[in-house]
Image (cartoon, grey):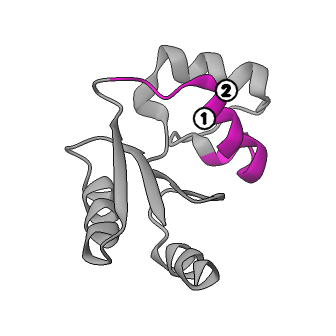
Amino acid sequence: MEAQIFGKKDSNETKKALRFVKERRIKVHFVDLDQRPAAAGELRRFGQKYGWAALLNIKPQPTALSEAHVLPMLERNPSWLSIPLVRMGNELAVGWDEARWRTFLKSAR
């Protein structure tokens, strides 16, 4: 199994996600969002699974939360993205969610 983690090096949640996969000897591809923004296609994958509100780490959230609204907002304000975004195989998770990651590992066995 391999993992892809989108996050920032200075984010505690991202650091914990990286430590989680490394402790389990899972090969990880880290995308530092300070160096390279997440591609719209990647964000679309997470937004379609969890809803567009899940991708936004802002309060209060705007009322109109469609792909057409959220993707441009995140392009203009990448710091509004909930991180880390974790992909293990075909499974996805938004934010710190160790319990969900553990289910990914169990289903991969």
Please identify the quadrant where the C terminus is shown. Answer: bottom right
Relative to 30, residue 23 above or below: below
Q: Which mark is residue 70?
A: 2
The part of the image, by quadrant, that contains residue 22 is bottom left
User: Where, by quadrant of the figure, is residue 108 drawn?
Assistant: bottom right
Say whether residue 57 is left or right of residue 29.
right
Residue under label 1:
42
Q: Which amino acid type is marked by label 2?
A: Val
* Residue 78 falls in image quadrant: top left
Left or right: 100 in relation to 13: right
Residue lying at 26% horizontally and 48% vertically, measured from the top left:
11
The disc labelled 1 sits on which kind of residue? Glu
Residue 84: tell me if it is visible: no
Front residue of 65/102: it is 102
**Towards the viewer: 52 or 16:** 16
Measure the C-alpha gap from mark 2 to mark 1. 13 Å
Q: Is residue 104 left or right of residue 4?
A: right
Q: Residue at x 49, y 37 (%)?
A: 81
Range covered by the magenta-colored residues: 36-54
User: Which percent across, then down, holds residue 3?
Assistant: 45, 57
